Image (cartoon, rainbow, N blue to C red):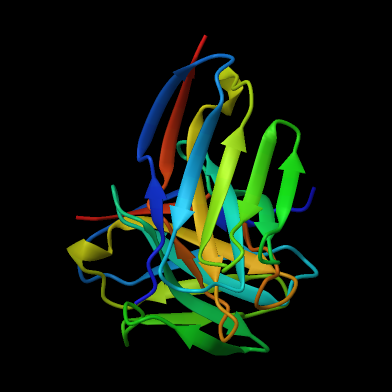
Amino acid sequence: TQLLEQSPQFLSIQEGENLTVYCNSSSVFSSLQWYRQEPGEGPVLLVTVVTGGEVKKLKRLTFQFGDARKDSSLHITAAQPGDTGLYLCAGARWNGNKLVFGAGTILRVKS
Amino acid sequence: EPEVTQTPSHQVTQMGQEVILRCVPISNHLYFYWYRQILGQKVEFLVSFYNNEISEKSEIFDDQFSVERPDGSNFTLKIRSTKLEDSAMYFCASSSGGGDQPQHFGDGTRLSIL
């Protein structure tokens, strides 16, 4: 069974602070996708990381894929209230198309 | 930007009844998926569909479930005889390719079984 563990489960911070969300597994994934989900809506894709060690930036968000392809992180710089939401990581394997999801990190940014 | 659309947004059904959830994937996508999320739990994979056949399915996707692409635009999930434990959010997704190609999700159908 492939598992993706996300941490922390819940994060409440002040506007302007930095934060990092972690996604870890004992399994190797061919890629990891990060999503953000608002209440009542489906997951919205933020980024896909494919190469071990890859770093991708999306404005104030930095995504990294571990060298061994077993872990990934999402770092947000100078968080804003608009960043509030549920962040999900999901891994894909080489021999299939399904995504394995983590449990998510609920982020709340207070102004 | 193209998006995946799902109908209905909320479906309430009596236990034992059949239900069909509908999805219109992004038009040039070739791979289609159903996932579900029981309240308070992780998003779980149900089935993937490519070239008019199931390419992968989970142990959740038993004989009560079926998928169909009845025409060139719709992708449906049917549950033949619903159980209480089928209550969940059901998400449809599509991608342009398999493997590492990003999957784009609809907003889901909330299925409530009474």
Q: Nearer the viewer, residue B102 or B86?
A: B102
Q: Nearer the viewer, residue B14 or B110?
A: B110
Determine whether B22 is above or below B63 in the image. above
Residue B69: image location, x then y, percent: 61, 80
Q: Is residue A38 visible?
A: no
The picture quadrant where one finds residue B29 is bottom right
Which quadrant is home to the C terminus of chain B?
Answer: bottom left
Determine whether B20 is above or below B50 in the image. above
The picture quadrant where one finds residue B106 is bottom right
Residue A1: image location, x then y, percent: 34, 77
Residue B43: image location, x then y, percent: 41, 58
Q: Residue at x 44, y 58 (%)?
A: A24
Residue A92: image location, x then y, percent: 56, 71
Determine whether B42 is above or below B71 in the image. above
Please indicate whether residue B86 sits to the left or right of residue A74 in the image: left
Name, please, the residue furthest toward the top. A111
Q: Residue at x 71, y 51 (%)?
A: A55
Please indicate whether residue A79 sits to the left or right of residue A101 in the image: right
Q: Residue at x 67, y 65 (%)?
A: B25
Please indicate whether residue B58 sits to the left or right of residue A21 in the image: left
Q: Nearer the viewer, residue B85 or A105?
A: A105
The picture quadrant where one finds residue A60 is top right
Q: Is residue B20 visible?
A: yes
